[in-house]
């Protein structure tokens, strides 16, 4: 048995490939005595997991196959990239604002042009600092 976590799925797949019976357990579903929560170390964790497994008190987690795990990794990477882009835009926007630079171009009808458009990027590229 192994706790679910960063290395849980890979370790389970490797052990199963060697013919070793291994399950991945959902730690969040295991009820741990409050006294054990204060003494966190590998030995105590191993004893706790062995006790839980011996009494059948382990909720097994579904172990995704390699293709599913790759898709999940790709989804996470895409989400991280979107978050990074959003934070970068926020930082750039606030940096320019601190220097008194505000994009305020208008369309021929008088409507304000949006940020992060080609016109906005052209405006950003035109900015020069001393």
Image (cartoon, rainbow, N blue to C red):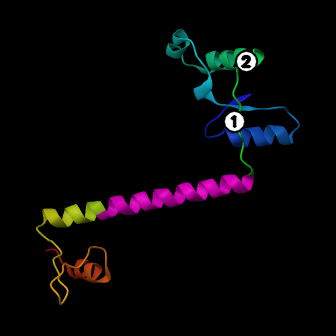
Q: Position of residue 50 (x, y in %)?
A: 73, 18
Indicate the quadrant where residue 122 lies.
bottom left
Looking at the picture, does residue 67 appear above or below residue 55? below
- In the picture, the disc for residue 44 is none
Name the residue at 31% across, 64% down.
Answer: 89
**Residue sitting at the far right:** 19
In depth, the one of 107 and 14 nearer the eye is 107
Residue occupied by mark 1:
61
Q: Is residue 106 magenta?
A: no
- Closest to the camera, between mark 1 and mark 2, is 1
Residue occupied by mark 2:
50
Q: Residues within 10 Å of mark 2 (few under 14, many from 20)?
A: some
Indicate the quadrant where residue 126 lies.
bottom left
Indicate the quadrant where residue 55 lies.
top right
Task: Write down the region rendered in magenta.
Answer: 66-89
Looking at the picture, does residue 76 appear above or below residue 20? below
Dominant SS in magenta? helix
Q: Does the residue at mark 1 contact the one at mark 2 (Cβ under 8 Å)? A: no
Name the residue at 75% across, 50% down.
Answer: 65
Q: Position of residue 26 (x, y in %)?
A: 64, 30
Q: Is residue 88 magenta?
A: yes
Q: Quadrant of the N terminus?
A: top right
Name the residue at 29% across, 79% down.
Answer: 121
């Amino acid at each position: 048995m192994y706790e679910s976590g960063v290395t849980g799925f890979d370790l389970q797949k490797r052990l199963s490939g060697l013919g070793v019976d291994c399950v991945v357990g959902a730690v969040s579903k295991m009820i741990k005595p409050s006294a054990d929560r204060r003494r966190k170390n590998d030995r105590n964790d191993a004893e706790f997991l062995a006790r839980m497994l011996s009494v059948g008190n382990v909720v097994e987690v579904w172990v995704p196959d390699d293709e599913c795990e790759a898709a999940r990794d790709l989804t996470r990477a895409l989400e991280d990239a979107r978050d990074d882009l959003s934070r970068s835009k926020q930082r750039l926007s606030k940096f320019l604002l601190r220097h008194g630079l505000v994009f305020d171009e208008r369309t021929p009808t008088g409507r304000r042009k949006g940020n992060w458009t080609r016109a906005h990027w052209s405006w950003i590229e035109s900015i020069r600092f001393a």
